[in-house]
Amino acid sequence: MGKGKTDVLDIRNLGKTYGKHAALRDVTLSAEGGEVFGLLGPNGAGKTTLLRILATLLQPTAGTAAVAGHDVTREPEAVRRIIGVVNGGMGLPARLTGREVLRSFAGFYGLTRGQADRRIAELDAALDLGRTLDTRAGEYSTGMKQKVVIARAVIHDPHVLILDEAASGLDIFARRTLLDFVAAARRPGRLTLYSTHVMSEAEEVCDRVAILHEGALVTVGTIPDILARTGERNLERAFFALVRGTEARRAV
């Protein structure tokens, strides 16, 4: 661990199987407070399975995972109180405005109306919520919807923010707002898990990344370290070099 940092995520020998199919295989890694940690890999690599376990939506078949010291299997309620989750398929009640959605979720986490409205004002400034706040969700574009989904996930200022392909389907303006928000949200004690298959996004916002392939962990490191190790000039090329090397070793 770096000086002054705290270990927020601790995953040891984590596995998840469905019948004979191993969605995750013996994954061990840790992440610190104060960093944006990327999970990289193609569809089917195991990223979403891992994040769903961390969000207490799936039970692991093997191994352990702890978020801020809380075991995801034994203490799911404690974990849910300190995380926020965003993925590309989350919905909003069509009849409610963005402000009504956010006030409702703020109430779930014990915020008063005044606290909720102050937090909504902060998120409006950070995410440029604009007219989403007083427009019904049924009238939203994809980008408007995702902004409110992100605001809803962080209304309680969680210790751990899980973003699973959160930029999927966003236009260039909404995507820029998301990436700027992720960068600005970095602070001591908070961990952001950023899952993507778009390597340029990871290069821009992530402090360290873990590469997953076919359910297994290929490598973990800073992007400069990974580029130096592979001799490649960008993360996408380094990713392919590492994955192909893994496949070649398995074939021997």
Image (cartoon, grey):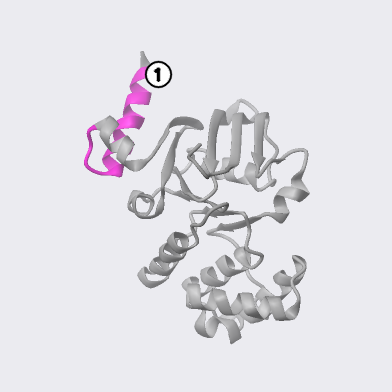
Disc 1 packing (10 Å; few <14; some 14–19; many ≥20): few
Give the percent coordinates (x, y) of residue 28.
55, 30
- Measured from the top left, where is residue 111 in percent x and y? 74, 71
Q: Is residue 224 visible?
A: yes
Give the vertical position of 163 relative to 218 (above or below). below
89 or 107: nearer the viewer: 107
Please give the name of the residue rendered at 48% of the width and 49% of the height, measured from the top-left corner.
Answer: 35
Amino acid at the residue labelled 1: Arg
In the image, 128: left or right of 203? right
Q: Please tell me which residue lies in front, 26 or 45.
A: 26
Query: For the point 68% across and 76% down, which residue is it?
Result: 116
Q: Is residue 117 above or below residue 233?
A: below
Q: Which residue is mark 1?
A: 250
Q: Secondary structure at mark 1?
A: helix
Q: Describe residue 76's horizontal placement relative to residue 42 as left or right.
A: right
Span highlighted in magenta in the image: 231-250
| 167 inside magenta stretch | no
* x, y percent for residue 202: 38, 50
Which residue occupies 60% across, 36% down? 10
Above or below, 218 relative to 92: above
Q: Nearer the viewer, residue 57 or 82?
A: 82
Asked whether 249 falls inside the magenta stretch, the response is yes
In the rendered image, is residue 141 in sight?
no
